[in-house]
Image: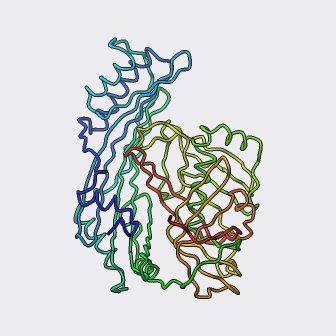
């Protein structure tokens, strides 16, 4: 039934213990941070006797998921540990070795792979250890059970048309250490996601509505409330206008979630590692300063308070700092910070917390003549051709600053990204934040995008599922 409704139930399946994505539980012998730090420093001293540049990035990652749906309520826990040692030889060649064993013997074995069996050590003057990482309260199963039940029970809308209802809380509690001869850094980040899903039949067609919120900090720092949860059910029960949507170029208002999805795919395609691997994209960007609307200023800021994608230092050990990517419509910078999926995957340039500067328009001022695009979003973007296709759950007709009541499901926006951004003539006052937990070979890469409503123009058409 979930497949028929198009639901992504991987996290729910994992929470109930029936999914293949359940991570391996790997217990490290070196849980004490003092011992682990000493083992890492000793290993780096051996590496520094062979290589002029050495670095260690260690991680202890606990994941907890609580979910409730028609099967009941369940809590599942998993853990992954690891360390990646990175070295550069005198010829400038980089090498790295990853192990998931944080015991003394596991770290010694990893060092032997890179430095050989010799026991020579360089004399390194490591800086003093930093203060202990942020102390967060352990989240007990009962607290998770109560929290996810509270979200599910907040819904005040009941209807026989709702055929599936679920709520989920997903917590990634991650402590990382970055140690090199010139620095010793430690951070603990707890990322919390809450999601509500509703599915209802609209005639012979299933309609799925979701709401997701994420932040860093304690479980109770934020909470999905009754108006928001009931709004998810109301969106799923929304009656669609019969007949076919007329294709054509239209004035459109992008809901914050749609704006965020477009910014996310654009930055990853043009500013991230994918662009560097495509010469035609790199050449095009090297010869342009950008042509987006002067109303658009975009910053990647991992230091934003409570940002789901935020951190204190990146996976190369560099302290976090904001990077302005677009300023008043012009390219102003590039993603240079290094990130690894799960802190152990291949190093690549990737966004953390994208924030589009809010504008001066209220939603009523943006809603003139056109269509409001909202709901679940899918995106497809080709950086080579600049072609962008955005699928949305529904399009609401706007006239004279208000909705007409006509709503069409499954509409696509088809355009070129540069043209879409250049035609932006209105930016909303209030930003909303979308969160993404993107898995790469089973390892998560976290990011968030804060964006307001945007008014622009593009070609709309009925979405085809053929």
Residue under the point 57% across and 66% down: 258
Rendered image quadrant of residue 166 = bottom left
Considering depth in this image, is 106 or 425 the residue closer to the camera? 425
Residue under the point 40% across and 32% down: 84
Count the numbered circles shown.
0
Image side of residue 247 versus residue 261, left or right? right
Considering depth in this image, is 423 or 115 the residue closer to the camera? 423
| Figure check: 7 above or below 158 | above
Instruction: List x then y, in percent, for residue 71.
Output: 23, 69
| Figure check: 319 above or below 35 | below
| Figure check: 46 above or below 96 | above
Instruction: List x then y, in percent, for residue 350.
Output: 54, 45
Instruction: List x then y, in percent, for residue 444.
Output: 41, 48
Image side of residue 82 versus residue 393, left or right? left
Quadrant of the snapshot with the N terminus: bottom left
Residue under the point 65% across and 62% down: 357
| Figure check: 326 above or below 162 | above
Instruction: List x then y, in percent, for residue 299.
Output: 63, 54
Q: How is the image coloured?
A: rainbow
Considering depth in this image, is 401 or 336 the residue closer to the camera? 401
Residue under the point 30% across and 23% down: 108
């Amino acid at each position: 039934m979930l497949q028929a409704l198009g639901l992504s139930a991987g996290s729910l399946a994992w929470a109930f213990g029936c999914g293949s994505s359940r991570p391996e539980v790997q217990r490290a012998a070196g849980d004490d941070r003092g011992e682990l730090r000493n083992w890492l420093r000793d290993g780096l001293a051996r590496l520094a006797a062979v290589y002029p540049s050495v670095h260690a990035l260690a991680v202890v990652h606990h994941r907890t998921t609580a979910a409730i749906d028609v099967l009941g309520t369940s809590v599942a826990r998993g853990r992954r540990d690891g360390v990646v040692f990175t070295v550069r030889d005198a010829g400038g060649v980089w090498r790295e070795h990853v192990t998931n064993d944080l015991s003394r013997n596991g770290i010694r074995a990893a060092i032997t792979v890179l430095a050989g069996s010799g026991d020579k050590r360089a004399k390194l003057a490591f800086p003093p250890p930093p203060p202990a990482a942020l102390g967060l309260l352990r989240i007990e199963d009962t607290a998770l059970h109560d929290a996810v039940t509270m979200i599910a029970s907040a819904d005040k809308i009941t209807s026989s048309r709702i055929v599936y209802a679920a709520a989920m809380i997903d917590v990634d509690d991650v402590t990382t250490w970055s140690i090199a001869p010139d620095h010793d850094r430690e951070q603990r980040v707890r990322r919390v996601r809450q999601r509500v899903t509703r599915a209802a039949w609209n005639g012979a067609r299933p309609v799925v509505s979701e709401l997701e919120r994420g932040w860093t900090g304690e479980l109770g720092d934020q909470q999905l409330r009754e108006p928001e949860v009931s709004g998810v059910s109301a969106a799923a029960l929304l009656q669609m206008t019969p007949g076919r949507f007329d294709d054509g170029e239209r004035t459109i208002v992008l809901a914050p979630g749609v704006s965020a999805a477009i910014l996310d795919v654009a930055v990853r395609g043009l500013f991230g590692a994918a662009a560097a691997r495509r010469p035609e994209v790199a050449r095009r960007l090297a010869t342009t300063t950008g042509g987006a609307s002067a109303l658009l200023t975009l910053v990647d800021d991992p230091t934003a308070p409570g940002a789901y994608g935020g951190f204190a230092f990146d996976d190369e050990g560099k302290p976090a700092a904001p990077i302005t990517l677009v300023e008043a419509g012009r390219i102003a910078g590039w993603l240079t910070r290094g990130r690894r999926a799960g802190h152990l995957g291949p190093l690549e340039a990737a966004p953390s917390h994208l924030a589009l500067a809010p504008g001066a328009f209220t939603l009523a001022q943006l809603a003139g003549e056109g269509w409001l695009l909202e709901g679940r979003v899918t995106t497809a973007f080709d950086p080579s051709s600049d072609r962008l296709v955005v699928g949305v759950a529904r399009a609401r007709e706007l006239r004279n600053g208000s909705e007409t009541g006509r709503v069409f499901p499954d509409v696509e926006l088809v355009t070129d990204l540069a043209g879409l951004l250049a035609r932006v003539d209105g930016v909303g006052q209030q930003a909303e934040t979308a969160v993404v937990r993107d898995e790469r070979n089973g390892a998560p890469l976290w990011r968030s995008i804060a964006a307001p409503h945007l008014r622009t123009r593009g070609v709309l058409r009925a979405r085809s599922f053929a």
